[in-house]
Amino acid sequence: MTSNSKPSSVPYTSLPSHPDPVPQNVIVLSYYHPPPNPSLVFLRRCIFFTFAIFLLSAAAFFLYPSDPTLQVARIRLNHVRVNSPPKLTLDLSFSLVIRIRNRDFFSLDYSSLDVSVGYRGRELGLVRSQGGKIRARGSSYVNALLDLNGLEIIHDVFYLIEDLARGVIPFDTSTKVHGELGLLFFKIPIKARVSCEVYVNTDNQTIVRQDCYPELGYGQGMAPTPAAQGPSSDGKAIDQGIAYILLLVALAVTYLFH
């Protein structure tokens, strides 16, 4: 039996060497910002304003001007003599060394330094020294010679006779300084005072005891106004008041922002 076969005529296509890439779609998403936490925002504001108040308070504490401090570094009696005929008069001479300390961060120009001596609350004499300049956070020593001759003691003659009988005469010395503090373009007036009670032995011409203390304020007379124990300053109290005010302002601003 004979079979007849025919060749296949189905066309074939060759495979491409580089097939077409599959198309891709890219979606870009923005960064998601979560809503801020109110408590965290309030805490950050509190920290920021607290730090700002701390800096302002520190600046006010260190830069606010304060009065200089006076200290009697040395006091020496040169002579004391009581003359009776024909009138009861007194010859007195003191040598003092005054230390002026500038506590501020700016230079200090003082115009004068006044040293006075008194007896029983009455001023007997006054000597004035020339002014000078003290650098920031510096000190200066000023010599003062108080020489009084022929002083008539009229009002307190009975007290003077009693003190002469005991051999010790109490005197009051007062030292005052006036000046200006240079703060940028401003001139701030300042003043300071220190008072001493000096007990003089008329027999051996020596100082038996001396008590000195600074004063916060003074008037025209010789009567002292004792200060509190230890160094004190009105400027430091004002600094605390400024710090409290700034703190209240910061709390108010924080409350408004919240």
Image (tube, helix red, strand yellow):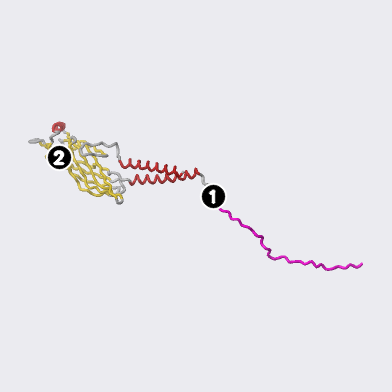
Graded by Cα atoms within 10 Å as few (under 14), some (14 to 19) or many (20 or more), the crowding at tag 2 reads many
| Rendering coords of residue 105 (x, y %) | 31, 48
Please, is residue 233 above or below residue 135 in the view? above
Please, is residue 252 above or below residue 156 in the view? below
| Amino acid type of the residue tagged 2 in the rendering | Leu
| Amino acid type of the residue tagged 1 in the rendering | His
Q: How many circles with numbers are drawn on the protein?
A: 2
Residue 58 placement: quadrant: top left
Q: Is residue 113 magenta?
A: no
Residue 95 placement: quadrant: top left
Viewer-side residue, 128 vs 13: 13
**In the picture provided, is 16 more to the left or to the right than 159?**
right
Q: Is residue 21 magenta?
A: yes
Viewer-side residue, 255 vs 108: 255
Please, is residue 167 above or below residue 66 in the view? above
| Rendering coords of residue 168 (x, y %) | 17, 34
Which element is circle 1 on? loop
Query: Magenta span covers which residues?
Result: 1-30
Q: Are marks 1 and 2 in contact (CB under 8 Å)?
A: no
- Residue at x 59%, y 55% (from the top left corner): 28
- Residue at x 35%, y 41% (from the top left corner): 241
Q: Which residue is mark 2?
A: 92
Residue farthest to the left, as pictured: 86
User: Which numbered circle lies on residue 33?
Assistant: 1
The quadrant the N terminus occupies is bottom right
- Residue at x 35%, y 45% (from the top left corner): 60
Distance in Å between CA atoms under marks 1 and 2 = 87 Å
**In the picture provided, is 132 more to the left or to the right than 84?**
right
User: Which numbered circle lies on residue 24?
Assistant: none
Viewer-side residue, 43 vs 170: 43
| Rendering coords of residue 15 (x, y %) | 72, 65
Residue farthest to the front, as pictured: 256
